[in-house]
Amino acid sequence: MRVHIATIRKRACWSNYVAELVSNVQHAVRKHSDISKLRFLLYSSQLLPEDRARIEKDDAGVVWLGNSQ
């Protein structure tokens, strides 16, 4: 997935980018390491509800920060 910086500066694009990034990192860690070692620090205040829900379905390794959860 190639994304231009100017594109992800828009909230909707950024939110989708983060959800995809979390998924890709989880997949790679599961394939090459141990998911229990992953720590993906995430402030969710700018995530769109649908992207937050996508991450919450599988939030292994995600550390929710701030008033996120």
Image (tube, grey):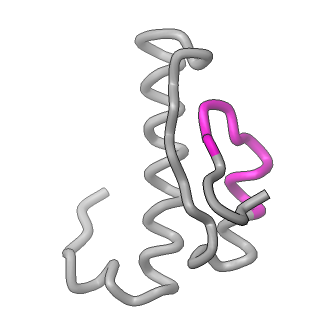
Q: Is residue 31 toward the left or the right of residue 55 in the image?
A: left
Q: Residue furthest bottom?
A: 10
Above or below for 29 versus 8: above
Where residue 68 sits, quadrant-wise, is: bottom right
In the foreground, 32 or 44? 44
Q: Is residue 39 magenta?
A: no
The x, y position of residue 51, in whole percent, is 66, 68
The x, y position of residue 48, in whole percent, is 65, 79
Read off the magenta span.
53-63
Q: Is residue 19 toward the left or the right of residue 66 in the image?
A: left
Above or below for 23 versus 13: above
Q: Is residue 56 toward the left or the right of residue 38 in the image?
A: right
- Which quadrant of the figure contains the N terminus? bottom left
**Residue drawn 43% across the image and 26% down it:** 28
The x, y position of residue 50, in whole percent, is 73, 73
Q: Residue furthest front?
A: 66
The x, y position of residue 40, in whole percent, is 50, 40
Above or below for 40 versus 48: above
Above or below for 34 versus 5: above
**Residue drawn 58% across the image and 19% down it:** 35
**Residue drawn 70% across the image and 41% down it:** 59
**Residue drawn 44% across the image and 51% down it:** 21
Q: Is residue 7 toward the left or the right of residue 64 in the image?
A: left
Q: Is residue 56 magenta?
A: yes
- Which quadrant of the figure contains the C terminus? bottom right
For the image, the number of numbered tags is 0
